[in-house]
Amino acid sequence: MRRAVCPGSFDPVTNGHLDVVGRASSLFDEVVVAVGVNASKNRLFSAEERMEMLREVCADLPNVRVAGFTGLLTTFCAEQGIQAIVKGLRAVSDFEYELQMAQMNASLTDVETVFVPTSPEYSFLASSLVKEVATFGGDVSSLVPASVHARLTERLAEVAARRAQA
Ligand code: PNS
């Protein structure tokens, strides 16, 4: 069985992520969408919430499952019998860092990195930008799945209400 991982923070998952996951699912027998659970990073959504959103939006992809991981991605790959890491490349600016990570990961274990060029309509998309635009009232409804948009709107309203009280 050819098994791949699509790793990321997914805070939250965007249409750009889904594009890459969908394409990986057509190339591999099984795709594990692996959510990095890094406690030191400040996230808008908890790891459980991020995984829940991913499960909802990947429900129509039968060979895709969602998992969390801590520590090294290469350790997760070895534990799960994963041969390939699939990464989306949005622009040349992504390439340098992604190449460095791919080479580091290959030096740690026998895992291949496969780069998938992001579809042009998503080449500017990043979770951080989606959050920033949404925080200031911009319309991001075409950039994330509808269920994610609803949660994002709700969470940002909670955050704003908390800030107003403080
Ligand atoms: O969505 P992100 O924030 O770009 O995801 C980054 C992620 C989680 C894929 C990356 O930070 C990662 O692989 N973290 C696990 C720790 C690790 O293996 N680090 C060495 C990378 S060479």
Image: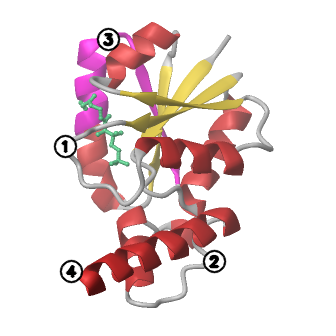
Q: Residue at x 43, y 42 (%)?
A: 47
Residue 114 within the segment the image draws in magenta = yes
Ligand 1's quadrant is top left
* Residue positioned 22% across, 26% down in the render: 104
**Residue at numbered disc 4:** 166
Residue 151 spot, x, y in % from top left: 57, 66
- In space, the residues marked 2 and 1 are separated at their CA atoms by 30 Å
Q: Nearer the viewer, mark 2 or mark 4?
A: 4
Separation of marks 1 and 3 at Cα, in angstroms: 25 Å
Camera-side mark, 1 or 3: 1
Quarter of the image with the N terminus in it: top right
- Number of marks drawn: 4
Upstream in the sequence, badge 4 or badge 1?
1
Q: What stretch is highlighted in magenta?
A: 100-117
Mark 3 falls on what kind of element? loop
Front residue (pair 86, 96): 86
Asked if residue 94 is positioned above or below residue 102 in the image, the reply reads below
The image position of residue 75, as x and y in percent, is 34, 14
Where does label 3 land, which residue?
A: 109
Q: Which of 80 and 67 is in front in this view?
A: 67
In the rendered image, the vertical position of residue 138 relative to residue 20, given as above or below: below
